[in-house]
Amino acid sequence: MPLDEKVLVIPTERFRAACYFHGLRAADSAFRAAILDPAVFQFRPRYEVETDPSFKQLIPYIVLKCGDHLFHYRRGAAGTEKRLEALRSIGIGGHISEADAAGGDDPYQTGMMRELTEEVELGCGFHERCVGFINDDRTPVGSVHLGVVHIFELVSRTAHSREDALADSGFAPLAELLRDVEQFETWSQFALEELGRPTRA
């Protein structure tokens, strides 16, 4: 994505007013409605907002799951976010562009599906649900992005990478990925730790 392309953002003050947090927060309906309200969406040049913490770029962060296995990969040199290069990840997704707004009433949903189909071939059916949000203001990348975590429950482990930016991809058990959690980017660490928590009755 060119740096002069306009990307979807919300004012950081909107995020703070809805409920500031650090780490991964569950996607309850009130918070989801406040953050993903098209009325507050703006499209601004990426080169401006990449270093402006007064805006949060909304990034769909799709986790592909089949049973107890998760899709994972290493961020290759072909990726656009050089600050994350060589780190491992379980998240698929990227910036929502202004062009996605031409695809219907929900540019976020349109952009999420575009990002997914550009990066991965699923090869099977799935069920999708939004499970949480990720914020980490401790890093330059995190201070200008807000992750929206979606779980795609796959029918089978057929997904494979379409891009060189998703290197060494495949499926592995959650327990195995948790043992290597320090090798993953911060957002993936939050997501893995949340997925590894015991299920509440």
Image (cartoon, rainbow, N blue to C red):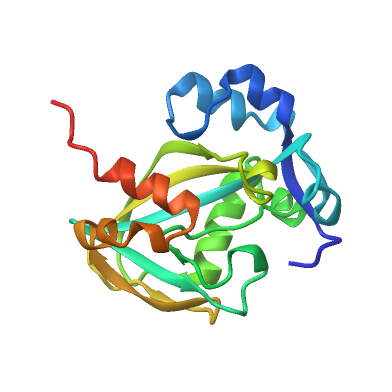
Does 99 appear above or below 119? above
The residue shown at (68%, 32%) is 38
The residue shown at (81%, 43%) is 52
50, 9: nearer the viewer? 50
Q: Is residue 25 visible?
A: yes
User: In the drawing, does residue 159 fall left or right of residue 199?
Assistant: right
Quarter of the rendering containing residue 14? top right
Does 76 appear above or below 194? below
Does 200 appear above or below 113? above
Residue 21, position in %: x, y?
A: 53, 27
The residue shown at (24%, 67%) is 172
The residue shown at (84%, 56%) is 47
Residue 123, position in %: x, y?
A: 34, 72
User: In the drawing, does residue 136 fall left or right of residue 121?
Assistant: right
Residue 81, position in %: x, y?
A: 66, 65
106, 43: nearer the viewer? 43
Quarter of the rendering containing residue 70? bottom left
Quarter of the picture containing the N terminus is bottom right
Quarter of the picture containing the C terminus is top left
Quarter of the rendering containing residue 136? top right
How many marks the image carries: the answer is: 0
Residue 60, position in %: x, y?
A: 54, 49
Does 25 appear above or below 188? above
Q: Is residue 154 visible?
A: no
